[in-house]
Amino acid sequence: MEELIGIKKRTAIFISGNGSNMKNLIKYSKKKYSLINVDLVISSNKKSNAIRYLKKNKIDFKIFDFKQKNKDERKIFNILKKREIQLICLAGFMKILSKSFIKRFNGKILNIHPSLLPKYKGLNTHERAILNKEKFSGCTVHFVNSKLDSGKIIIQKKVKINKKDNPKSLSKKILKQEHLLYPKALKEILSRT
């Protein structure tokens, strides 16, 4: 493992929300043993609370609203190419990337999803799991392919659903696990390359 230190992958994080997984990945990237370096954040939401954090920590970011998806994706691709980005981590990114964009970064885009895939792809995962009286839910880190939440699973973490849980409490429990799982997944795939 020692010889891997210093060969950090140039990474871009894509976000849409408050960026709790983004902040977690940035903190992880600063650790000595981390295998990523966060060079850029792409946000689809100019009102995201994460922007303040990025400015404070002097992390470069760009905002694209994806209203002209093809045009925005082309611009993003050129920026990533120029920056020699080797890995993309989707962290609460609520836009669907086109097949051609995914193809260009084949096997280099990861996503974290708040369910035990293949169950509950898409949105409202916590509500759906509770509604269906599941005993467990959890989170999944997977490779991104052209089908929504369908790429090869890297790692998962089970979370018990208690009778008292509601979507909000379950979301909180799962988010805690997401923060542990994403760095673990990165370690797993990057220590093999």
Image: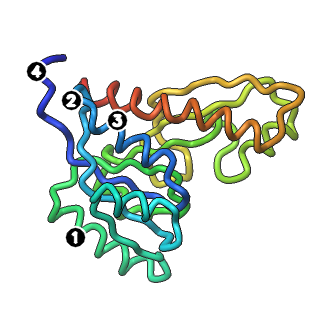
How far is disc 4 from disc 3 in space, using C-alphas? 19 Å
For disc 4, the neighbor class at 10 Å (few under 14, some 14 to 19, many from 20) is few
- Badge 1 element: helix
The C terminus: image quadrant: top left
Label whose residue precedes the other's in the sequence (1 or 2): 1
Which disc, if any, is residue 193? Answer: 2
Label whose residue precedes the other's in the sequence (2 or 3): 3
> What residue is pinned by disc 1?
78
Instruction: Classify residue 75 by image quadrant.
Output: bottom left
For disc 3, the neighbor class at 10 Å (few under 14, some 14 to 19, many from 20) is many
For disc 2, the neighbor class at 10 Å (few under 14, some 14 to 19, many from 20) is few
- Badge 4 element: helix
> What residue is pinned by disc 3?
28
* Residue located at (47% from left, 50% from top): 91
* Residue located at (76% from left, 44% from top): 168
Q: Is residue 139 left or right of residue 4?
A: right
Give the percent coordinates (x, y) of residue 24: 43, 41
Label whose residue precedes the other's in the sequence (2 or 4): 4
Which of discs 2 and 4 lies nearer the camera? The answer is 4
> What residue is pinned by disc 4?
3
How far is disc 2 from disc 3 in space, using C-alphas? 19 Å
Three-letter amino acid code at disc 1?
Asn
How far is disc 4 from disc 1 in space, using C-alphas? 31 Å
Q: Residue pushed farthest front?
A: 56
Q: Is residue 90 above or below residue 52?
A: above
- Badge 2 element: loop
Three-letter amino acid code at disc 2?
Thr
How far is disc 1 from disc 2 in space, using C-alphas? 25 Å
